[in-house]
Image (spheres, rainbow, N blue to C red):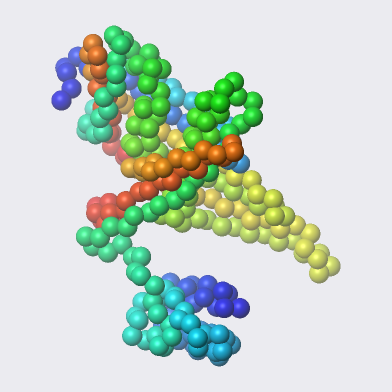
Amino acid sequence: MLALEAKEYLVSYRVVVKDSYLYNDYLKISKAMSGCSGVESQTIHLKNNGFDDLKQLVNENLWEFVTYLDRIGLHVKSYGKTTNLTNKNTTILELRTHCFKVDFNDTFATITAINTEGF
Amino acid sequence: MEQFLLVYADIVIHKGYKMRYSFVVALLLALGASSLSAEITTIRCEDSTLMPQNVQCAPNQFLRKDSKILVTVVGQGVAPSNTISPAQAYALAKRAAIADGYRILAEKVRGVEVEGQDIIKNMMVQNSTVKTQVEALIKDANVIETVFKDGLCEVEMEMMLLHSDFSR
């Protein structure tokens, strides 16, 4: 159960892999300008060293947060082209902009994904 | 030849032509009677009672009601050479391997769109192109094991498919 003053953030994540090499990845985090409505879904607890901002929190726990995003569900697009037996492949993993509620405490923070319609 | 016939048989089953299926099995037996008589051939089929004695049906992989299928894949990623530390190379390779694992999961679960084009001029192949494409939403895939060796990262991933996920 989240606290009433839980902060809301919008997060999007995208990974591009070309021919088995990580080509590009970005994680965008911004504060939600308006309230998010939807159903609470998966939750993660991260260690918190007194931060009250999701960007700082994620910087300290990047791998855990990215693994959590994987669990929520990623859109996969993959394109392959084989020309005269030479293969090229591009795979894109994407978390489309998603709302999260974050409850900051002194020693830990609770992050909960909010599922809106269509996801 | 045997391989070709098995692939063809599979296509026939998917389209549901059982009569044609028996024709293919008969052709298979006629062409490779000597080799088949010693071993049992396993193929995918709908009704095992229609099969000859030396042909048996593979375990059913259809997702029936109240059943589940565990899909396991291995994704591979390569560590780039221009990293500032081995740890960074490992992290990047693992991320690439996970993305590759997601792609294979999508291909297994959703299927692949394949488009091929061959240009032939004066009885010679000038250019051969095969394009593949897949799009899917993958949830609840887990990394089971990670192996990093000689700059190559391999991750074993699995995902449980439940009938209830598709029957809403």
Pinpoint residue A63: horizontal percent, then vertical percent.
Answer: 40, 27
> Looking at the figure, which quarter contains the N terminus of chain A?
top left
> Looking at the figure, which quarter contains the C terminus of chain A?
top left
Is A48 placed above or below B46 here? Answer: above
- Horizontal arrangement in the rendering, residue B67 relative to residue B17 (left or right): left
Q: Nearer the viewer, residue A110 or B127?
A: A110
Is A113 placed above or below B69 here? Answer: above
Which residue lies at the image location 32% right of the left edge and 20% below the top edge?
A9
User: Is residue B100 something that shows in the picture?
Assistant: no
Pinpoint residue A95: horizontal percent, then vertical percent.
Answer: 41, 33
Number of marks in picture: 0
Q: Nearer the viewer, residue B40 or B22?
A: B40
Q: Residue furthest right?
A: B122
- Horizontal arrangement in the rendering, residue A82 relative to residue B98 (left or right): right
Is A12 placed above or below B49 here? Answer: above
Pinpoint residue A86: horizontal percent, then vertical percent.
Answer: 69, 50
Which residue lies at the image location 44% right of the left edge and 76% below the top edge?
B42
